[in-house]
Image (cartoon, rainbow, N blue to C red):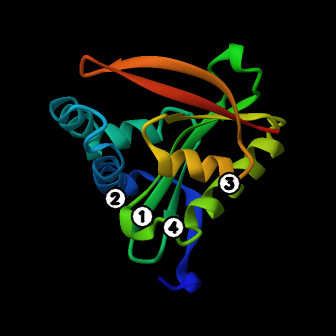
Amino acid sequence: MSDLLVSIRRAKTEDSVGLSRVFDASWREAYQGVIPGLALEKLIARRSAEWWRSAIGRGRPLVVLDVGEGVVGYVSYGRCRNRGLHADGEIDELYLTPEYQGVGYGKRLFKAVRNDLRDREMPRVAVWALADNPRARGFYESLGGRSIAHVEERIGGVPLAKIAYLFT
């Protein structure tokens, strides 16, 4: 995992297969046993390469972490969609394939996106994490995120608690 070939860049349509692969691997690792099995499989199946090709052109920023061997992570972000959070920007999703987690790449992605949001005059950033995902919660807390809201969302018929973190 050499840092020599690492780049963080805007997603391109040719990244769609890699994005689908990252989503599949990271969601299985993060949510197996948390999101009911059938619901998780349906969520993963919806994020095909075709879905990602469409998402790349939708207008909300999407950046990838490319290590020279292809896409191993991504972040989707933009203006905050929930006015009640009192945030300007929002990180919708930040995921890495399991083998690239825990070695600093997530922090690099997060900082790059925070810098872009600041440049777009969105210094207060919100991000949501499932309460049953201690790795994500620990990651955002270690970066200085402050818990500002808790909600419950039903996924696959099961209530799952979500926590919003604010970065200022």
Residue visible at 31% across and 50% down in the picture: 20
Q: Position of residue 40 (x, y in %)?
A: 24, 35
Q: Residue lying farthest left?
A: 38
For marks 1 and 3, the one nearer the N-term is 1
Q: CA distance from mark 2 to mark 1?
A: 7 Å
Secondary structure of residue under mark 4: loop
Residue bearing the label numbered 1? 72
Q: Are marks 2 and 1 in contact (CB under 8 Å)?
A: yes
User: Considering only order in the chain, which callout, 1 or 2, is on the residue closer to the N terminus?
Assistant: 2
- Side (left or right) of 53 relative to 143: left
- Do residues under tags 2 and 3 come within 8 Å of each other at their CB atoms? no
Circle 1: is it few (<14), some (14-19), or many (20+) Cα within 10 Å?
Answer: many
Residue type at mark 2: give it.
Answer: Gly
Residue 15: x and y in percent read 39, 57
Q: 76 or 142, which lies in front?
A: 142
Mark 2 vs mark 4, CA separation in Å: 20 Å
For the C terminus, the quadrant is: top right
Question: What's the residue type where badge 1 is placed?
Answer: Val
Question: Which element carries disc 2, helix, strand or loop?
Answer: helix
Seen as rendered, the residue at the extreme top is 84
Task: Determine contact: label 2, label 4, CB under 8 Å.
Answer: no
Whether residue 92 sits left or right of residue 35 in the image: it is right
**Distance between mark 1 and mark 3 Cα atoms:** 22 Å
Query: Does the residue at mark 4 contact the one at mark 1 (Cβ under 8 Å)?
Result: no
- The label shown at residue 18 is 2
The spot of residue 5 in percent (x, y) is 54, 81
- Label 2 vs 3, first from the N-terminus: 2
Q: Residue at x 61, y 58 (%)?
A: 109
Q: Which residue is mark 4?
A: 102
Residue depicted at 47% across the width and 38% down the height: 57
Left or right, residue 168 beside residue 66? right
Density class for disc 4 (Cα within 10 Å; few <14, some 14-19, many ≥20) is: few
